[in-house]
Amino acid sequence: MEFELIATDPETGARAGLLHTAHGTIETPIFMPVGTVGSVKAVMQEQLKQDVKAQIILGNTYHLYLRPGTEILEKAGGLHKFNGWDKPILTDSGGYQVFSLSANRKLKEEGALFQSHIDGSRHLFTPESVMDIQRSIGADIVMAFDECTPYPCEYNDAKKSMEMTHRWLARCFQRFNETEPKYGYEQSLFPIVQGSTYKDLRIQSAEFAASMEADGNAIGGLSVGEPEQDMYEMCELVTGILPKTKPRYLMGVGTPWNILECIGLGVDMFDCVMPTRNGRNGMLFTTEGVINIKNKRWADDFSPIDAGLDGGSSNTYTKAYLRHLFAAQEILGLQLASLQNLSFYLHLVKEARKHIIAGDYGKWRREQMEIVKRRL
Ligand code: PRF
């Protein structure tokens, strides 16, 4: 995998790049729609390509391991063949999901023991097993097995957790380098920086991640309830240490304004369930601001869902119609809202990239901040 830096914004430190993978080139900064079980909820692959213009999607090791399982994924020839998405895929390692979803989890040096949220069956994830599972899934980018600390977290707990994440990271690289890709194309392993909201831990963790000389690096443990300012501060500290020549991925972030802010701190990749999950609840992110489509005020608004996006279903359908679909609990409502929000997120990062290349990202961001935070 190769990362080409195209431009750096003089005012903010935002970067525009090209990330070349076996399944195509990704223009950064980029937002990656979340497809937990191998499917971006309510959105078909054709729409992801044509409407949303997604360049890479995410899958979760935890979910895919439990269902359909590695045997089926291997028989299919990997996740790309299984789900019909022929562009890049990134898989999260399961570390985060074991802690947020499974029952009775127990953490040991060896790994994490947990019970499936589906049927209660018992499983052990280790850094080694998680690397093997991600070889079977066949994502272009695979993530290290880490522990994401909750917020708030005592200093000593954060330190112990980070140190174990580092020992797990070394084991991940060991296993990853001992094994071969299963489907004939290259995969890249990204380390994950932890350290909660403690500066010295974040510095230590970023230096440890950087020492792996990986194809890219991720920042975890943020957007877990800490004040936004703390997230930005940790993010800035870490991007200052991670190598400039490799992409930086901020995991599970965030709102449109979080993304604009963190692009300015030198982050290149983002993922978040917010556009799809909030969309299914009727919250729309648009080029004019945030709207709740269930609100009465849209009942006779026959303007497009978002005239500011070029082409796609957000130009075709009206706000009044989408509100009606939500009121009638029609499946199409969930689809159109998901499409709108994902299209908007991808539009936002594309515009950001244009302005980074033009050299006026700082000025553009100040104008956009007002708009994306506006509640209509
Ligand atoms: N670790 C992993 N996945 C994640 C996170 C993390 O810390 C986060 C935190 N925002 C989201 N997804 N492996």
Image: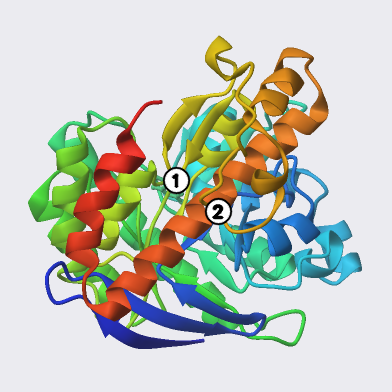
Q: Is residue 205 above or below residue 320?
A: below
- In the displayed orientation, state which residue is furthest to the top: 296
Check disc 2 and give the amino acid type: Leu
Q: Residue 292: horizontal and vertical position, in percent?
A: 51, 22
User: Which quadrant of the rendered structure holds the C terminus?
Assistant: top left
Q: Secondary structure at mark 2?
A: loop
Going by the numbered disc 1, the residue's amino acid type is: Thr
The kind of secondary structure element at disc 1 is loop
270 versus 36 height, above or below: below
Residue 94: % across, % down: 56, 48
Relative to 306, is 12 on the left or the right? left
**Residue 353, x across and y down, in percent:** 37, 71
Which residue is identified by label 2? 309
> Which mark is on residue 287?
1
Q: CA distance from mark 2 to mark 1?
A: 7 Å
> Residue at horizontal 72%, vertical 50%?
65
Q: Residue at x 55, y 53 (%)?
A: 309
Near mark 2 (Cα within 10 A), the count class, few <14, some 14-19 or many ≥20, is many
User: 268 and 279: which one is in front?
Assistant: 279
Q: Nearer the viewer, residue 376 or 94?
A: 376
Location of residue 311 with respect to 223 vertically, above or below: below
Residue 42 vs 268, above or below: the answer is: above
Residue 202 appears in the figure? yes
Q: How is the image coloured?
A: rainbow
Instruction: Please state which of residues 374 and 17 is positioned toward the viewer in this rendering.
Output: 374
- The structure residue drawn at horizontal position 56% and vertical position 43%, both measured from the top left corner, is 306
Q: Is residue 150 left or right of residue 63?
A: left
Q: Position of residue 112 (x, y in %)?
A: 52, 43
Tell me which label, 2 or 1, sits earlier in the chain.
1
